[in-house]
Amino acid sequence: MTKTVFITGASRGIGRACALAFGKAGWNVAINFLQNQEKAQSLLEELLDSGAQAALFQADVSQQAEIQNALQQATKTFGQIDALVNNAGIAKQQLFSDVTLEDWRQIFQVNVEGVFHTCQAVLPQMIHRKEGRIINLSSIWGITGGSCEVSYSASKAAVIGLTKALAKELGPSGITVNCVAPGVIDTEMNGNLDQEALEMLKEETPLGVIGKPQDVAELVLFLATEKAGFLTGQVISPNGGILI
């Protein structure tokens, strides 16, 4: 039976690259998105044109009822969810002294509570089958911390802690839970960086380049396969060689 992956925040960036990688590998792809209907539809058409089976599921991961319904609909459409990729996230660069309580809560609602909601929604079927893959997207800043990104760094560190603890809890059920913590990747989220900042980041990266979404997507795909069956509770950082 063809396996199915549910990817949050899949309309652009790393999420989009993951969707294309899974589709190319023969998976059914459940595309979750929040607002960008045009980009989500474009991704859907690209997947369908390539011969993959895919469908759109609009939902806000920070709203429990919405994402639960989306996962239920995806399960009805494809039969079951074999892998969950928690990619949806937001970031905001600002001095810590300027962070409002609203800013802090919004980032945690999406980046941490979103993972909580999706995992709780998909786990009953995975536990019942005694198999499943969960891959959570964190960030190198969740490991090292990032200046002017305290709230983002804290939320991504929370995702790492959630991953490690959940992996221990779900191991006896045959479910793996791993975390991918990318370095600097060429995505819209980093689109606010000027050329000077990008050049400085390149210099700090031993490989001397900024990563591509595809670099992350291939790792995520690997973690969802049988080849990664003995990997769980791990935090892997595709970052071009930056020591962490």
Image (spheres, rainbow, N blue to C red):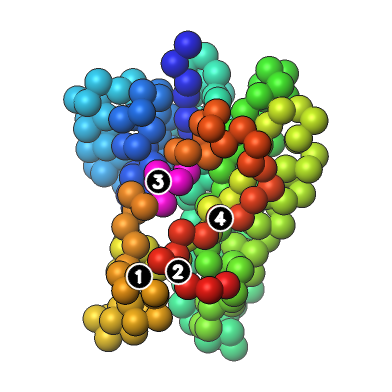
Which residue type carries mark 2? Gly
Q: CA distance from mark 1 to mark 2?
A: 6 Å
Is the C-beta separation of discs 4 and 2 under 8 Å?
no
- Residue 58 on image: x %, y %: 42, 36
First along the sequence among labels 2 and 3: 3
In the displayed image of the protein, which residue is found farthest to the left? Answer: 49
Residue on which disc 3 sits: 217
Instruction: Tell me: 181 left or right of 167.
Output: left
Which residue type carries mark 4? Ile
Is the C-beta separation of discs 1 and 3 under 8 Å?
no
Q: Residues within 10 Å of mark 2 (few under 14, many from 20)?
A: few
Q: Is residue 66 visible?
A: no
Which residue type carries mark 1? Leu
Residue on which disc 4 sits: 236
User: Which structural element holds mark 2?
Assistant: loop
User: Which structural element holds mark 3?
Assistant: helix
Q: Is residue 80 above or below residue 209?
A: above
